[in-house]
Image (cartoon, helix red, strand yellow):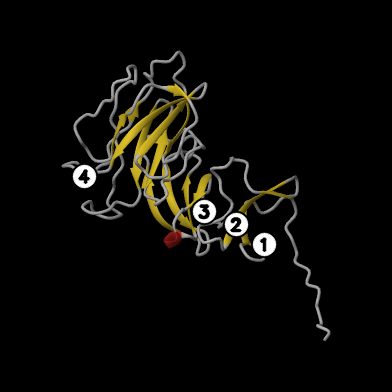
Amino acid sequence: MGVAREAVTVPLPAGDWSSSSGGPEHQPWNADETLITIENRGTRASPSPLILDGSTYEPKSGPCSNYPLWDYRWHPTLAHAHEQINVTADGLELMWFDVVSCTKTRSWTLPIAASYGIGSGKGNPSNDGRFVVIAATTRVYVVDMDPQPPSAPYPHNRIGPPLDVSDCGLTDCTIGWAGISASGKYGVVSYSGDHERVFEVDPRPSRSARTRCRGAPTDTRARRRPASSPASVTPAGRSTRSTTTRT
């Protein structure tokens, strides 16, 4: 039995498509795999980035006109599958932005400008979408984007006072990138030469309503645990040359 077929031509934007220039931390698929974000490059490329349909791969939209996207990641949870986590080009605002409804859903004014986006362009949020590490030139801090009980929920602000990580015991303590582990239990600072320094994250609230980052130079192998504080971050060992395992 013959089946009639009709050829459908889909107009495609000009340019060369690629998943991302940012590396593996820039995943093209959103959490529920209904959307794909890709870069559209070339002299005639427009718009960029593009949002594709996750089933047909046809272009759905370009960037929202009110979205100051710069260094962004898809939100990792199904509950926020249409949202991206983004740091603006000036490094002064962190936001969640729904790319389907073109709506900013959450926003934080950062106390110190990010040197480049999320963890110097190489960071990711924790798997629950709660924590992210922001890196400045010599300091890092944690933002609790989705506070959980007994802390008050968003828009309650939990941003930690910055931790100076410039005294690392190495010849060169330039921050290469910083990030949070998938579990949200550990923060990592990677210095020039791939020397990585691991911190523990303690999200427990205290009298202060703010997320805190605390620590000291990891110049010994001793494990240090200062007094507890909300989302405090403490060094877990000496700076080492190794590959980070996200746990």
Residue type at tag 1 = Tyr
Residue at mark 4 to residue at mark 3: CA–CA distance: 33 Å
Q: Residues within 10 Å of mark 2 (few under 14, many from 20)?
A: many
Please report contact status of discs 1 and 2: CB closer than 8 Å, yes or no.
yes
Residue at mark 3 to residue at mark 2: CA–CA distance: 17 Å
Residue at mark 4 to residue at mark 2: CA–CA distance: 37 Å
Q: Which residue is mark 1?
A: 57
Which numbered disc, 4 or 3, marks the residue that appears first in the sequence? 3
Q: Is the C terminus in the top left, top right, bottom left or bottom right quadrant?
A: top left
Which numbered disc, 1 or 4, marks the residue that appears first in the sequence? 1
Please report contact status of discs 1 and 3: CB closer than 8 Å, yes or no.
no
Q: Residues within 10 Å of mark 3 (few under 14, many from 20)?
A: some
Q: Is the N terminus in the top left, top right, bottom left or bottom right quadrant?
A: bottom right
Mark 1 or 3: in front is 1
Which numbered disc, 1 or 2, marks the residue that appears first in the sequence? 2
SS under mark 4: loop
SS under mark 3: loop
Q: Which residue is mark 4?
A: 205
Task: Answer yes or no: is residue 61 visible.
Answer: no
The residue furthest top is 171
